[in-house]
Image (tube, coloured by chain):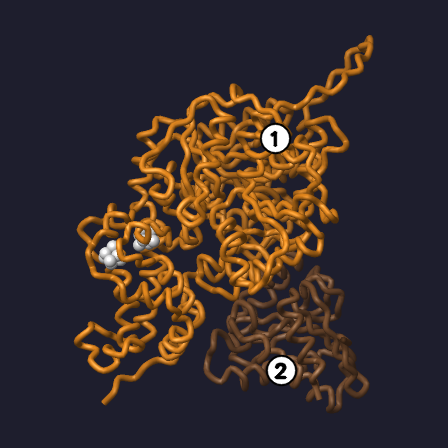
Chain colours: A orange, B brown
């Protein structure tokens, strides 16, 4: 009697047949099990006694299915070639844990295979097959649906995106004391259309302001699109080519509509690979404009003399982490190094580097799959060792995903390093041409400026006393009345009693965690109006906040937070100039 | 090419854009059977509509595929949200189930006294229903419903981008 196959397993096999192409079949049949890829994988290095992490072992599960159904020898003599089919939903779930939980699609094994087997490519294909029957980690579903329906991976609504751009535009005008220093939105016929990662809007708007500062000083004719602005593409991670095509098409069509001459992609490895390399193929479109990484744009501006930089403003020792997608898949590794030479005084290589560098271990969408976090962090040991060996205090990377991945590794292994991007370093080194200053006769009476937070009551919630003291003193120095809570219950109690204007809220606390506190306060009409700025050291917990069916927090910051960042965000939330 | 079609005294119109931001009396949300709003359009509904929608949905029993529940729309531009639990991820009998979901959505909306209702491409995108099939079933169902006795005046189909819009426009042109 033949074994019964579940409906999903049937559909999985049907779709596999449609997806196979020459390259994929080549990869599936070429492996000679020489084992040369084994040591290339960071999961193997962290689990040396567990053969199930070896790339060739992981690959074999799909290879057996392929052999059983699509290789003629396997169809006739499955026992001879090791063919093995797939029957149940449980087996599909097991496959899910391999392709999503034991591989970041970093392609390090692929470039180390003498037979040209590209495991990462068919690992991605397998993810896509599972997604097509609805089997995927919860986080992958959440992010994919946001990108399908809201148009970006982090569910940023259009009004919030525009609001952030306007905020950054105002900040820039103030900083440069120049009314023309703005972020133009939907301007037609520009030389540069600048696309970004939604992470920049939600957690790191400074990178937008820094980029704007650079474009402005270069005298660039540039704009940012009001729609289709997300250059990241979760289709690359989930293996869903339809999503890949839909996202890429939205951006390409917007650039064409604006008649932009060049699409500049901000620093993001998978965004760059998806938009520049894979997108036209997924979308089935011919592109009539150029595409460029912002790393190359910045380098070009310096070389062409359009901006001037002073590297002595960046003296802290720096190392550089290559994003897998930039370096291994797109060959973008010399330009960031050339740029570093120009904007920092002390930068050190990490080893191995360029195409051989190790994954930040947060790649392939791993940051969204919290069920695999312990394993991911365990596999990050090699990355932590690489970072430590450089002796640098800052690790620079040209990828927003790597920023999150590295921040997590640094925290977990207590490395005490900071993570930065090239745009921040270039902006910091930028020499702003002096404006003609009209000397005013000083007024006789000295105007005493009121502290900016005078009259505001702010509740600071964090279980780490050092952080609590630091935030409190910064806020107090700026005139705020500060209340403090070391745990969730006290936070709720104080919020109810004191009705502060704003609270800063840590997520990971013993007892009632920040997520629960946040939802409780939002759901209580008496406290729903309190503005909240989440400040967390665990970026992977963000989803816990944004998935809650309540109005999202007014602000969000990643630790470590310095004084300027804290004040910038507090002022923005309280709408203070 | 025209982006609308009259069926008796009602009209079907295509409008490209974000359905959760549409100026219309009611719109359909392609829901899960537990009626948890989740991400995507569910996220927009939570953020733009406020907590009252979730509170209302929490009191509703789990639904089956094809079932529909009409909730208030909180602080959104629309007055009502029609939560329709359609088929997902290539599940068995997708076509039949989608048709049932469409008919139930129209019926329940009408029972609430709704006159103007918008649909997204039902089950396309994240849930993987192919666009041509989706457009065909949706427009056929709407047409069939409007040909009967009805007080529904306007049905808007609201694709998010040109990739979704084009197959709907083609299907609307060939709607006999
Ligand atoms: S290096 Fe290539 S041929 Fe050798 S085991 Fe790995 S995938 Fe197979
Ligand atoms: S792609 Fe990277 S994570 Fe996946 S098996 Fe290969 S080396 Fe390991």
Q: Is A171 rendered above or below residue A287?
A: above
Count of picture labels: 2
Q: Would you call the spot at circle 1 few (<14 residues within 10 Å), some (14-19), or many (20 or more)?
A: few
How far across and down, in percent of the image, does residue B120 sit? 64, 71
Q: Find the distance from the CA under tag 1 to the CA under tag 2.
A: 55 Å
Instruction: Give the residue pinned by disc 1.
Output: A304
How far across and down, in percent of the image, does residue A512 sit? 45, 46
Instruction: Give the residue pinned by disc 2.
Output: B136
- A394 relative position to A546: left or right: left
How far across and down, in percent of the image, does residue A94 sit? 30, 66
Q: Is A157 rendered above or below residue A473?
A: below
How far across and down, in percent of the image, does residue A236 sit? 46, 57
Identify the residue at image location x=32%, y=50%.
Answer: A111
Q: Is A459 rendered above or below residue A251?
A: above
Disc 1 on helix, strand or loop?
loop
Query: Ligand 1 shows up in which quadrant of the image?
Result: bottom left
Which residue is most to the top?
A444
Subunit that carries the residue with mark 2: B
């Amino acid at each position: 009697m033949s074994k019964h196959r579940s409906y999903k397993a049937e559909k999985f096999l049907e779709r596999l047949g449609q997806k196979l192409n020459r390259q994929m079949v080549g990869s599936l049949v070429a492996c000679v099990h020489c084992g040369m890829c084994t040591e290339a994988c960071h999961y193997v290095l962290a689990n040396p006694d567990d053969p199930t992490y070896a790339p060739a072992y992981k690959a074999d599960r799909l290879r057996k299915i392929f052999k059983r159904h699509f290789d003629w020898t396997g169809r006739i003599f499955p026992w001879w070639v090791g063919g093995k089919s797939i029957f149940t939903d449980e087996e599909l779930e097991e496959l899910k844990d391999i392709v999503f939980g034991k591989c970041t699609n970093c392609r390090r094994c692929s470039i180390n295979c003498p037979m040209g087997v590209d495991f990462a490519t068919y690992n991605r294909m397998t993810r896509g097959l599972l997604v097509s029957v609805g089997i995927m980690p919860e986080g992958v579903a959440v992010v994919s649906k946001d990108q399908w329906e809201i148009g970006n991976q982090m569910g940023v609504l259009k009004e919030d995106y525009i609001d952030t751009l306007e905020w950054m535009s105002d900040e820039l005008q103030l900083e440069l004391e120049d009314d023309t220093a703005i972020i133009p939105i939907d301007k037609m016929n520009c030389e540069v259309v600048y696309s970004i990662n939604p992470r920049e809007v939600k957690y790191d708007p400074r990178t937008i302001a820094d980029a704007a500062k650079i474009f402005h000083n270069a005298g660039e004719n540039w704009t940012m699109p009001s729609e289709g602005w997300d250059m990241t593409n979760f289709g690359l991670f989930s293996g869903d080519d339809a999503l890949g095509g839909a996202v890429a098409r939205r951006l390409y069509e917007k650039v064409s509509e604006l008649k932009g001459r060049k699409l500049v992609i901000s620093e993001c490895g998978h965004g760059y690979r998806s938009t520049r390399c894979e997108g036209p193929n997924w979308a089935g479109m011919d592109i009539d404009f150029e595409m460029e990484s912002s790393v190359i744009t910045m380098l070009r501006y310096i070389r062409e003399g359009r901006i001037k930089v002073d590297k002595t403003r960046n003296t802290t020792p720096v190392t550089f982490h290559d994003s897998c997608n930039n370096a291994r898949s797109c060959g973008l590794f010399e330009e960031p190094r050339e740029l570093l030479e120009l904007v920092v005084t002390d930068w050190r290589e990490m080893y191995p580097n360029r195409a051989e560098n190790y994954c930040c271990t947060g790649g392939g969408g791993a940051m969204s799959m919290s069920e695999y976090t312990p394993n991911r962090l365990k596999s990050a040991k090699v990355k932590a060792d690489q970072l430590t060996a450089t002796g640098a205090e800052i690790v620079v990377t040209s990828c927003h995903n790597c920023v999150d991945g590295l921040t997590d590794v640094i925290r977990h292994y207590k490395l005490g390093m900071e993570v930065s991007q090239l745009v921040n370093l270039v902006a910091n080194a930028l020499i702003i041409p002096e404006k003609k200053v009209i000397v005013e006769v000083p007024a006789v009476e000295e105007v005493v400026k009121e502290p900016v937070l005078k009259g505001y009551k702010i509740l600071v919630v964090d279980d780490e006393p050092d952080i609590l003291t630091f935030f409190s003193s910064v806020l107090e120095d700026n005139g705020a009345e500060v209340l403090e809570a070391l745990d969730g219950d006290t936070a709720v109690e104080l919020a109810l009693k004191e009705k502060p204007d704003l609270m800063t809220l840590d997520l990971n606390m013993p007892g009632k965690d920040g997520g629960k506190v946040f939802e409780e306060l939002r759901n209580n009409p008496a406290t729903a109006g309190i503005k909240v700025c989440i400040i967390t050291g665990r970026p992977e917990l963000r989803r816990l906040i944004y998935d809650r069916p309540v109005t999202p927090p007014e602000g969000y910051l990643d630790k470590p937070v310095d004084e300027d960042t804290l004040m910038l965000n507090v002022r923005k939330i309280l709408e203070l100039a | 090419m025209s982006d609308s079609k009259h069926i008796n005294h009602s009209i079907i119109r295509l409008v490209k854009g974000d359905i959760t931001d549409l100026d219309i009396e009611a719109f359909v949300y392609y829901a899960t059977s537990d009626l948890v709003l989740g991400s995507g359009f569910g996220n927009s509904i939570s953020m733009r509509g406020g907590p009252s929608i979730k509170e209302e949905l929490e009191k509703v029993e789990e639904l089956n595929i094809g079932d529909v529940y009409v909730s208030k729309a909180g602080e959104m531009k629309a007055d009502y949200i029609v939560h329709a639990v359609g088929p997902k991820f290539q599940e068995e009998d997708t076509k039949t189930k989608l048709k049932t979901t469409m008919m139930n959505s129209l019926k329940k909306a009408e029972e609430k006294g709704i006159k103007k209702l918008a649909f997204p491409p039902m089950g396309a995108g994240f849930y993987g229903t192919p666009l041509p099939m989706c457009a065909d079933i949706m427009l056929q169902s709407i047409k069939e419903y409007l040909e009967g006795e009805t007080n529904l005046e306007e049905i808007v189909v609201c694709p998010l981008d040109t990739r979704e819009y084009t197959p709907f426009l083609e299907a609307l042109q060939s709607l006999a």
